[in-house]
Amino acid sequence: MRVAWLLLLTAPLWAQSPELAAYRAARRALADRPRGVIFNNDGCDVLHYPAQQPVSPAGLLDLRTTALAGSQVGAIAYCSISSGFGFFTHQTQAGTLLTRQPAEYRLATDVKNIAADLLAQGSDCLRIMVDFAHANRQELWWSLRMNDTHDVEHHPDRPYLLYPPLKEQHPEWLVGEVAKSTKVGRWSSVDYGRPEVRELAFRYLDEVARGYEVDGLELDFFRHLCYFRSVAHGGVASDAERDALTDLLRRVRTMTEQVGLARGRPLLLSIRVPDSVPYCRDHGLDLETWLREGLLDLLVTTCYFQLNPWEYSVELGRRYGVPVYPCLSDSRVLHESRFRRNSVESYRGRASNAWTAGAAGIHVFNQFNPRSPIWRELGSPATLRGKDKLYFVTVRDGNPNSWLVGGSRHSSLPVLTPDTPRTLQRQRPVDLDLRVGEDFSGAPAPQVTLCLELPTIRQANEVAATWNGQPLSEGKLAKSWLDLPLTPAQIRRGVNQLGLRAVGDEPGEAWPVAWQGPALPTGRWTRDRGSERCVAQPQEDGLLLADRGNVNGDYLYYRYPCGLDPDQETSIEVRVRVVSGLSSVLISNGRYHERLLLRPDGISLHSNSARRWALDTTAWHTYRVGIGGRDVRVWVDDVLRIDAPGAYGEANTDRQEVCIGAANSGDLGEAVWQSCRARPVLPTLHDAVVRVSYPQPAAAGIAAPAPK
């Protein structure tokens, strides 16, 4: 019977039965139906149910779902956990029901997992969500995370809530060894090169498709992005591995057609993947073949990072007749100071860009407040018109190299966030694309401002800016931000070119980067994660930075991203007293990298251990490192002690930063730091935002305030 179905469903169009041809036509029409917004719910409402609240379907729905009624949400993609590849919170025979409680695993004590409670009441979370969606004329898609690895936190000595029995029973099915990092990706990923894994994935999908009245299946390949041992250990997927995953997709497609024909209405299929055909291909996801063979109905792209403009995904989908839903995932960008990428204004800007690129709708991931305005605004360009927005150069700055060796080679977009700044040069401008999907044709006209975060400049005229080739002026500098006025007429709907360069006289005697202890460094300074064995402790005479462990991750540095000009003499000065072991000053200018190593009996350069000066560093000293091209000199208390022409080593990173701290993973070290400063420092761009502000309607009897 299965062979007969397969022959029927893979037959060319001219050989199809009238019933199958009609089904596929209906499926195509259903796929093209506008959905506005797809709300992805990761299912943690079941796992994190308030501990003191009585268990009921209404209580579950009120957490994330009830308020979506009447919104622009046309479909809910519900993930009944599917963490660890095998755990589920819906009724399952193919997988394992997750009944563990967070409190049992030293997690939150004010919440509880209600999966078993709902089953005891004669229902489960997935059935509840299906009933709600259909009662409110919404679709319900079941979202399967194809290789969720939140369970990477598992350790045999510290079991993790979401680590499933399947992986305990079959560690050989994993891409790595238990609790040991792989080169990229995560060790707890299952290896889809094994037929047993592919069979289980199919059974999970088949069970839900046949057992629940879902409208579609969402195969989430981005949570998390690791499918083959070959890729996890530094390679790319082979043709055989790609073919194996494609065969799985073909089998799933055939199953959905069987189910859809039997129940008399189409069952749709969606995937969420990176927005690059070659990046997907290297992972083993043969996206173009899947599209060409008609194996999916909706295409959802991006998550941790975005590799291409939305137009790339839209054009790809249109080429094969598949609607595209750009995924607006939470940003996770750190150290924002003024504007927030997770704000409502930012989501409006992101959605405007997606609609302008030709999106069929919007997919929203990891946003769970059902009362947020975004569910009633993002689903149409019309409801976004006339509302305040923020447009960023970069919204998500996850590293594609974390999941694929050399993955960033597939990126065509600039990356600019507070943790990935750009140094402005005098000789050549930094050019950035900034997309603004705004329709300014209606009234009233908004106030538009280009806002640039430049924490090291003192005057607005230290930076020259152009917008689409035209110089900008009348900038105002306040609290590290330079605001430059724009008019709606200056904005192109779509891509705009921002050009920036440093101008003015050479820097004088000021120290743009300066920290004075014993207080912890703040502002642009960031601290390494370290471990419980790493200590940062203010004390009377300075700041103690200590690394008291020698396992992976045991080190502690404070880092300041700054524009050290590789073509100009620069100085970095610290005052420090070594306590024991190894401490260091790290200096990177985007071209070269060096470390001044501090040990109790002397100092040396990391690039050349022979460049050493013996002295008692356990007493207070001021060390000044001078960099000129590849030449390095070190003064101790204003006396030149190390002179090393050509010692500065080529950097294997584009980082530009100064760091002070303790040891490394394999060594121990402690020192007390009093100060750190650096000069000269080129202007460093940490963020670029276009803010669009519309006049707000006045309340009755109250005049609207004048725009600032």
Image (cartoon, helix red, strand yellow):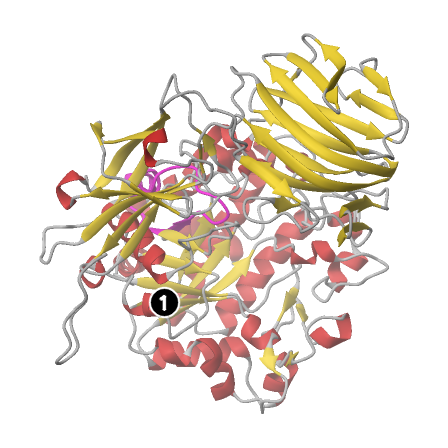
Disc 1 marks which residue?
75
Image position, residue 514 (x, y; %): 59, 38
**82 over 171 or under it: above or below:** below
Asked if residue 569 is positioned above or below residue 382 in the image, the reply reads above
Q: Residue at x 66, y 62 (%)?
A: 86
Viewer can see residue 655: no
Segment colored magenta: 299-325
Which residue is nearer to you in this view: 315 or 152?
152
Return the x and y of residue 402 as percentages of the image width and height. Answer: 60, 39
Q: Classify residue 305 as left or right of residue 553.
A: left
For residue 73, above or below residue 398: below
When asked about the image quadrant of residue 152, the answer is: bottom right
Q: Residue at x 30, y 73 (%)?
A: 71
Task: Please state the horizontal and vertical placement of residue 159, each as a whole percent of the image.
Answer: 80, 63
Q: Please tell me how crowded label 1 is: few (under 14), some (14-19), or many (20+) other residues with Cα within 10 Å.
A: many
User: Label 1 amino acid?
Assistant: Ala
Residue farthest to the top, as pictured: 645
Secondary structure of the residue carrying tag 1 is strand
Q: Closest to the observer: 295 or 446?
A: 446
Q: Indicate yes or no whether the magenta region holds residue 315.
A: yes
| The C terminus sits in image quarter | bottom left
In this view of the protein, can residue 452 be seen by the observer?
yes
**Residue under the image location 45 percent in, 61 percent down:** 217
Q: Residue 430 vs residue 158: left or right?
A: left
In the rendering, at what x and y percent does residue 104 appear? Answer: 77, 75
